[in-house]
Structure formats: C-alpha cells, structure tokens
Amino acid sequence: MSKNISNLSGRIGLKDNLFKQISENTLSDAPKDINEIAKKHNLGVSTLHGAESFYEFLRPSHREKKAFVCNGSACMCSGTQDKLKDTLKEKLGDDKVGEMFCLGHCYENNAFHYDGENYAGKDIEKIDQIINGEDIIQDKFFSKSYATTSFLMDDKLSSPEQFKEQLNKFLKTDKQKIIKSLLDSNLTGRGGAGFPTGMKWDFCSKAKGDKKYVICNADEGDSGAFSDRYLLEDQPLKVIFGMVLCGMVIGSDEGVLYIRGEYPKSIEAINGSINELKKLNLLGDNILGTDFSFDLGICIGQGAYICGEETALIASIEGRRAEVDVRPPFPVTEGLYKKPTVVNNVETLAAAIGILINGPEKFAAIGNKKSAGTKLVCLDSFFNNPGVYEIDMGTPMKKIFNEIGGGYKEPIKAFQIGGPLGGVVPLSEIDNLNLDFQEFTAKGFMLGHASVVSIPKDFSMSEYIHHLFEFSAEESCGKCFPGRLGSYRGKEMFDQVKNKTAKIPLKLLNELLVTMQKGCLCALCGAIPTPIMNILKYFGDEMKNDMVKDN
Ligand SMILES: Cc1cc2nc3c(=O)[nH]c(=O)nc-3n(C[C@H](O)[C@H](O)[C@H](O)COP(=O)(O)O)c2cc1C
C-alpha cells in the first residue's frame, strides 16, 4: 500500500510536492477542498487526511494558538519557561500559548515562537514591540573554530563567486576521485548512524535508476543541538554545494532540503541562497554551460521529531504518514519515490565540501579512523562560554568543557550529550571521555550530534526521566507496538511519581526498558532507554525514595 502511495506521489514528484500541498492547504486562511489535491495525485482522500493528522503544526489545537514556549531539555533545565509562559499568557490569553520542542536556542533559553519567528534570551522584555510587529535586534549564537584545520567554519565558500570558482573546478573532477577523497578522509555521517559518507555516495552512484535524489536532512530536533542551524544560517553555501556535488557524483538532477518548521531563519537563509544561485545559473539547468543540471527545493517540516529518521523523512516528503519503514531496502537503492537516494545530514554535507577543498589527508590526520576530522559541539547556557564550536575529534571532554566552555555558571551533576536519545553522562565521567563516537558508545553513552544539555545539581532526575518518556510518547510515530505503548507506560509510571501517588516498581521499569531497547522499530523509542538506564545506574541513590523493589 505505501509503495503505491510513493509511486503515485512520485508521478508528480518534488515540483508540486504532495506534502507541501497538504501543509500549505491546511495552514491557508482559505483552504481548498482536499478532494482536489487527492484527485490530482490519484490518491484517496483518507490518505491525505491520514498524513495531515500526523503533524503537530497542522492540528486545529495547535493552529489556534499564537505563541509557543520551547519545551526542549535545555530550556526545561534552565527553569526559565514557566515565567515566560505566564508572561505570554498575560499578553495573549491563557488558551493562546502552546509548546514546541526545542527551538535551538539552548545557549540562551527563554525561547519562544511567535508569529513565524523565534525569540529567546532577553527578547521577552520587548514583547510589546514584538506583538506590534516591530523588528527587534536579537542576539546570535557565538561560534568559533578551535580545530587544527577548519573544515566547517572557514570562509572558503561564503560568496557566490567562490561557489562558482569551486564548482568550475569540481565539475571537471573525476567522480571516482571525489568518492576516493571522501573514503580516504574517513568521514562518517554526522546525523547519528555514522555510516561512511564516501561509501554511501559510491553505493548510490552504482544503483540502477532513471532518476535519483539527494536529500539534506535538516530536521535537527535534538535538544541541545543548534549546529545544523548554525550551518544553514551562517554557511548555507557549503551545505548547498555539498548537495550539488553529491548530485553530480551519483547522477542526480534534483535535491531537497527537509528543514524543520521550528527554524524559520534557516528556511529564509537557504531560500535566499537557492534563489541567488539560480539567478547565476549555479543551480538549475545546464549549470555553467555543462550538461549537468541540478535543481533544489525545500520541504518544511511540520513539527514531528521522527521526521529526522531517514525513512520517516522520505515518507513525509512523499505525503505519507511519517512512519518509520523497515530497512533494507536502504534509501541508496530505494529511497524517495522508491528511487535511489542519498540522505545526508547538514553537517556531513558541509564537512564533505570542507574535505574536498582542504584535502582528505588533513581530515584523516585528526582523531582516528572511526572518529575522524572535526565535529561541531554545542554548549548550552550553563557554560560560561555557551555557543557552537568546531573541535578536533579526540579532544578530551574535560578540555572542551573547562577551557573552551569556560566551566559552569552553577553546580552541574550530569550532561545529556547527543540529544534525547543520547546518554546521560555524570560529571565524574567527563574526565574519562574524549570527543570520540566509539569511546562514548563503549562506556554506555552516545555522542550523536555532540550537543550538550547540562543538568543542574538540584534538578530532580525523576523529573528528567519523566521528560524523556513524555518526549518519546509524544514523538513516537506509533508504528511499532513496544515504542507506542512502552513510552506511554513509562510516562504513566513517572506521572505517578510526579503526583506522589505511587512509587516506581524497579523490576517492571527495567523490563519495560529492555523490551523497548530490543523490540522497537527505530532508535527513537529503541534508544530512549539509554539515558534512562544511565540515570538509574549513576543516580540510583538520588532516586531510591521514588522506587520500590518488586519481585
Ligand atoms: C529518531 C531519529 C531521529 C533522527 N534525527 C536526525 C536528524 O534530525 N538529522 C539527521 O541528519 N539525522 C537524523 N537521524 C539519522 C538519520 O536517520 C540518518 O541516519 C541520517 O540523516 C543520515 O545522514 P548521515 O549519513 O549524513 O549521518 C535520526 C535518526 C533517528 C532514529
């Protein structure tokens, strides 16, 4: 059934994309009859309703709100959000303020969304001006490269002239040489799964297909992370160049950036760059007079974390419910509209270009074979120097936190590193870790996107676990049984602790966590047990009053 939907949606493809039509129609002040869109795609109207009802932003309960307070982990730990919510309710009305999961302002908190824009830090003090529609000057994230060689933050691809110069060079470069450079660099995907990028491009270049696609996964939903946002807004040409070059290597003439709707400035920046490049014939048909054509568009996410998972992301673009699909087949052979597709993370694409410009040997010389090159690391507002930093793989975490981050503003007991699915690392373990994917995994954590959420000393760990279960219950795609039900059962257990109506049966909780770990279809509900198990292991003493031993 889903194959049929993919194929029918693919007949029209990206140009008049079904998901975009469903979203725009639902959000429009004068929506047209959804039957018209269904008919155009030869699909049943229930399929379209099924897709529409999947997304938070398209629900009537969301659309009737005016402002949304960030409920991501960093804003929650900072304790700024209750007061912020009260202020917004006072101005806009009690029923006009909702929530959004992580707006990527973890370095300053106090984050909220109003009328299509994000605000944070001290912006709330100017709420009257904001409501009056005035533009206010906002603080930007602090960014700096501490890397031996900068691959991600340099200015070697920051103007259309540089884009043209580099494109002229690479259009004449042998495709196999580009793949070899990526393989030699040891670049692995920065989106979480860590698959070698050169291998992914090679597989897709060899896959048979009359049409192929390049997808940039810009659905960065991990709280604590704003590194993809940094690249989309400050280095958009690097990200786009990565997609163009990937298209050339694999034999694709079309790509799409799936950018989360929670990042309006990123959408604006990428849109601006695409339009500028199209005018200069650096995108579109017969680029620079060659026979290579590559067109690029944007799909705007509608508030579903699971769309970061590549098969759910593909389903979303196709206008299906964004449910995870079983792999294999992998997207490189059967991806968007069932055509061979490369799905790469924003940072991976930017790093690929940094490598090709600066030389693969320089990237490979940093870190080790499995954790090579440089990585963006995001430090939240509990650090004295919050911001996004480019750092050599292999750097001691102690150095990153104490020297680059400048230590902490207040006592911290743990960090959640790598988003909601990443591990919770107690402060004492930081001394024993380096910035290294395998090292983190070996110690029972996960480096993931290398985003850091600090958990202050007086923050309750039971409340943190409640937050994690609540997140997976809200964001699970609902397709697999252990994920859908397990997350809710876990949330209910910790609801009872919060309301002081019952204690946690420890054996039952452990059984639930193992069932989710082993039985879930994807790493959303399958990896959420990791941080919870870390907390139980390292903070068991703190939690013992919330637990009962069951047999
Ligand atoms: C629940 C879940 C959420 C994910 N979210 C993202 C995301 O926001 N961005 C991303 O690039 N990859 C995300 N991934 C990983 C993607 O599925 C995929 O591995 C990645 O986009 C591949 O690109 P890469 O090879 O460049 O890392 C997520 C995976 C899971 C299981």
Image: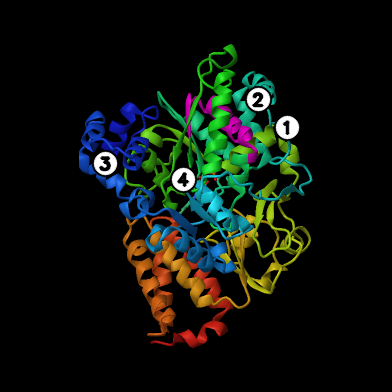
Q: Are marks 1 and 4 in contact (CB under 8 Å)?
A: no
Instruction: Please tell me which residue lies in front, 103 or 186.
Output: 103
Whether residue 417 sits left or right of residue 70 in the image: it is right
Q: Which mark is residue 156?
A: 1
Which badge, 2 or 3, is on the more N-terminal residue? 3
Which badge, 1 or 3, is on the more N-terminal residue? 3
Q: Which mark is residue 290?
A: none
Residue at numbered disc 4: 261
Residue at numbered disc 3: 48
Whether residue 91 sits left or right of residue 488 in the image: it is right
Amino acid on which the number 1 mark rests in the picture: Lys
Residue at numbered disc 2: 160
Q: Residues within 10 Å of mark 3 (few under 14, many from 20)?
A: many
- Disc 2 Cβ-to-ligand 1 distance below 8 Å: no
Q: Are marks 2 and 1 in contact (CB under 8 Å)?
A: no
Percent coordinates x, y for residue 214 in the rendering: 49, 33
Q: Are marks 4 and 3 in contact (CB under 8 Å)?
A: no
User: Mark 1 against mark 4, which lies toward the viewer?
Assistant: 4
